[in-house]
């Protein structure tokens, strides 16, 4: 039996210092429990503030469920004051703490307070830091001072100390409307520390943008492979996307740069056809290459017939608008709404507008409505709100159904899809969407695709459905770009003058030894596709211009590809001898917007198309060549490696010409930005 003297002796003894082995085991067990908790798939609960009733509820439950020996009435009367007193006592002595991130751990008898978990960094680093802080001490530590806590927190690796203490406390204090200091200085909380830098607290957003990968067109031998075939491309998305990248301070990735879209972004004053009977006119210019003294450029410019406003057909438009959760960004749905407001104000009173939205499912927001009811249409646009997943397939089907329902014979029937491209419900595979669009285009309804935003942009899907739906694609990053696409270029965007437009160029091996098509890598066609009317190709709108540039090596100039030892000269055939003075023969095949049979336009390229010097070429030709060089530099193409940015800027400056909307001046600014960023990279 223990007597009082022995108990008094125990009371006077100091608390023994724990053994280092015991502390190490305890630390390992605690860290193991922490790791298990963090790796658990169990829900973590809500971050919303909780009410101060949890402890009282638990205590009340325990008391009420305990069987008392007294009568039920006495038990009830006694339980009520007891519960109230105990609850009051617990709330006074142990204030409820908001949020798990404010938990701290104690070390030693009255040891230093530490954060329970690191916000960043790997587990091994956390273990090392914590083990170092829990090293055995020769005697119980004195109470921690604020300065000691600060020094110890600063000793932690970045992301453990600041993020765990300062960040967690600040975040939860803001959510409940209390100051970090007031919350951090409770009995169970460490003193608040300065917040960690933003890059230590916020993880980088995952970039889920998708672009089609492609290789730059190679140099080809005119003797072995004399024919080049491709679909025309009047899309402009690549230029707008590259512009945004440069203005945000970085060079665009190579696969985001499609040189032909950059060239065709700008309006050019090419000579157009006299009437709609022949919808195109072709202008070909041969000039020296500014980046290679041994080659020439064959510049092919096509201008479409410009439909006069008085003869413009009625328009039946269906706005297919993505309102999924991914569109909840200032540069997505709000910009989209502003863009479509501009278009509505451009329409004629007899035009028709319908609006279909899609998120988790597709729905009709506005049935076919005359543009004369402008306020009704604008109100429907303004009331759109983002939320949910992206059922793009369902939206496409519903939009085409409405377009077919209100189909205007000999008019403009078009679905205008606005999205960030994130289809994740229904058919989401690009090939499945391609088949769906190919099926729908047979209805005679055309398609325009407008991309918005960054981080989630699915450009590859946009290109797929645009190219296979008799469509065009544009990327809208600013309201000014929306004004260009939907107001300035409204006629070419809405009114199609020809579809399935293909270009085929045959080079004369007697005059040209090699050639290289600049751009159009994603628009390449097989040679036999040119005469196959079942093969889809691009469309051209009213007044649209299309430019294609070949770099050619004249016969006798230094070549990249050696001649074959046993090759047959092309001049062995009669056609070669008869047309020996031609550089090439350009063929354009197209269909009328409502036609199924193609027509052919041909243009021979001879010395008559050649100019003596680069400066002798027209202003538009020279500016488009500067843009072609710009795009190739962004793709880091070998052919222009010896051409510096200053030379591109010099050519573009001299060829700026009339620039009513400032597009060419903006290009010069982008070229200077690219030069600076490229120099910084090197």
Image (tube, helix red, strand yellow):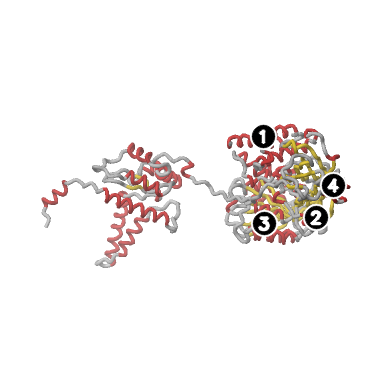
Residue 603 has which mark?
4
Mark 4 packing: few (<14 Cα in 10 Å), some, or many (20+)?
Answer: some
Residue drawn at the location 45% of the way across and 47% of the way down? 175
Residue drawn at the location 59% of the way across and 57% of the way down? 424
Q: Is mark 2 on a helix, strand or loop?
A: loop
Q: Distance between the residues labelled 4 and 1?
A: 34 Å
Residue 136's quadrant in the figure?
top left
Q: Where is residue 59 in the image (x, y as percent from the top left)?
A: 32, 58
Q: Do the residues labelled 2 and 4 touch (CB within 8 Å)?
A: no
Q: Identify which residue, 556 or 189, lies in the foreground.
A: 556
Q: Is mark 3 on a helix, strand or loop?
A: strand
The relative height of residue 525 versus residue 582 in the rendered view (above or below) is: below
Q: Distance between the residues labelled 2 and 1?
A: 43 Å
Q: Identify which residue, 577 or 423, lies in the foreground.
A: 577
Q: Identify residue for label 1.
A: 644
Query: Looking at the image, is mark 2 or mark 1 nearer the viewer?
Result: 1
Of mark 2 and mark 1, the one earlier in the sequence is: 2
Horizontal side, residue 291 vs residue 183: left or right = right
Of mark 4 and mark 1, the one earlier in the sequence is: 4
Q: Identify which residue, 513 or 330, lies in the foreground.
A: 513
Of mark 3 and mark 2, the one earlier in the sequence is: 3
Q: In which quarter of the image is the C terminus?
A: top right
Q: Where is residue 626 in the image (x, y as percent from the top left)?
A: 72, 37
Q: How far apart are marks 3 and 4 (CA)?
A: 44 Å
Residue drawn at the location 80% of the way across and 52% of the way down? 498
Residue 593 has which mark?
2
Query: Looking at the image, is mark 1 or mark 3 nearer the viewer?
Result: 1
Residue 289's quadrant in the figure?
top right
Q: Position of residue 314 (x, y in %)?
A: 79, 53
Q: Identify residue for label 3.
A: 356
Of mark 1 and mark 3, the one earlier in the sequence is: 3
Of mark 3 and mark 4, the one earlier in the sequence is: 3
């Amino acid at each position: 039996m223990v007597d009082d003297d022995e108990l008094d002796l125990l009371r006077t003894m100091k608390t023994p210092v724990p053994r280092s082995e015991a502390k190490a085991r305890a630390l390992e067990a605690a860290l193991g429990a922490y790791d298990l908790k963090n790796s658990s798939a169990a829900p973590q609960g809500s971050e919303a503030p909780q009410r101060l009733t949890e402890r009282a509820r638990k205590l009340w439950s325990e008391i009420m469920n305990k069987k008392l020996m007294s009568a039920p009435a006495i038990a009830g009367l006694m339980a009520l004051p007891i519960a109230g007193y105990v609850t009051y006592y617990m709330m006074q002595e142990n204030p409820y703490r908001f949020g798990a991130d404010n938990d701290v751990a104690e070390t030693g008898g009255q040891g230093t307070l530490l954060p329970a978990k690191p916000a960043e960094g790997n587990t091994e680093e956390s273990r090392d830091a914590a083990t170092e802080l829990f090293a055995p001490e020769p005697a119980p530590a004195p109470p921690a001072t604020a300065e000691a806590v600060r020094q110890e927190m600063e000793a932690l690796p970045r992301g453990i100390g600041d993020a765990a203490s300062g960040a967690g406390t600040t975040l939860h204090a803001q959510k409940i409307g209390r100051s970090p200091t007031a919350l951090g200085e409770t009995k169970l909380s460490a003193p608040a520390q300065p917040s960690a830098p933003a890059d230590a607290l916020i993880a980088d957003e995952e970039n889920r943008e998708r672009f089609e990968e492609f290789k730059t067109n190679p140099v080809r031998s005119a003797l072995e492979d004399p024919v080049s075939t491709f679909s025309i491309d009047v899309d402009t998305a690549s230029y707008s996307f590259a512009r945004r990248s440069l203005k945000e301070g970085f060079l665009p990735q190579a696969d985001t740069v499609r040189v032909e879209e950059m060239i065709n972004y700008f309006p050019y004053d090419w000579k157009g056809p006299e009437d709609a009977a022949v919808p195109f006119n072709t202008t070909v210019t041969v000039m020296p290459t500014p980046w290679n003294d041994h080659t020439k450029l064959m510049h092919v410019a096509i201008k479409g017939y410009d439909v006069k406003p008085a003869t413009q057909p009625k328009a039946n438009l269906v706005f297919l608008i993505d309102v999924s959760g991914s569109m909840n960004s200032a540069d997505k749905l709000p910009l989209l709404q502003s863009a479509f407001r501009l278009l509505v104000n451009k329409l004629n009173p007899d035009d028709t507008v319908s609006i279909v939205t899609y998120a988790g499912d597709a729905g009709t927001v506005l049935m076919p409505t005359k543009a004369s009811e402008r306020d009704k249409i604008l109100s429907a646009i303004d009331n759109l709100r983002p939320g949910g997943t992206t059922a793009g397939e369902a939206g496409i089907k519903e939009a085409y159904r409405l377009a077919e329902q209100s189909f205007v014979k000999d008019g403009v029937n078009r679905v205008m899809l606005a999205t960030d491209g994130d289809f994740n419900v229904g058919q989401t595979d690009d090939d499945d969407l391609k088949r769906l669009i190919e099926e729908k285009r047979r209805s005679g309804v055309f398609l325009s695709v407008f991309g918005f935003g960054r981080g989630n942009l699915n450009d590859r899907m946009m290109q797929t459905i645009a190219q296979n739906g008799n469509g065009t694609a544009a990327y809208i990053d600013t309201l000014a770009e929306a004004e260009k696409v939907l107001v300035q270029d409204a006629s070419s965007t809405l009114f199609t003058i020809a579809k399935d437009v293909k270009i085929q160029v045959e080079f004369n091996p007697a005059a040209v030894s090699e050639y290289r098509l600049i751009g159009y890598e994603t628009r390449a066609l097989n040679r036999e596709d040119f005469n196959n009317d079942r093969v889809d190709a691009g469309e051209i709108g009213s007044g649209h211009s299309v430019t294609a540039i070949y770099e050619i090596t004249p016969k006798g100039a230094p070549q990249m590809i050696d001649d074959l030892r046993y090759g047959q000269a092309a001049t062995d055939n009669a056609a070669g001898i008869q047309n020996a003075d031609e550089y090439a023969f350009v063929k354009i095949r197209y269909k009328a917007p409502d036609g199924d049979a193609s027509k052919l336009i041909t243009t021979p390229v001879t010395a008559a198309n050649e100019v003596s010097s680069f400066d002798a070429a027209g202003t538009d030709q020279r500016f488009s060549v500067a843009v072609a060089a710009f795009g190739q530099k962004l793709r880091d193409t070998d052919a222009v490696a010896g051409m510096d940015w200053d030379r591109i800027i010099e050519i573009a400056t001299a060829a700026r010409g009339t620039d009513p909307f400032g597009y060419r001046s903006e290009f010069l600014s982008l070229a200077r930005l690219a030069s600076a960023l490229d120099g910084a990279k090197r």
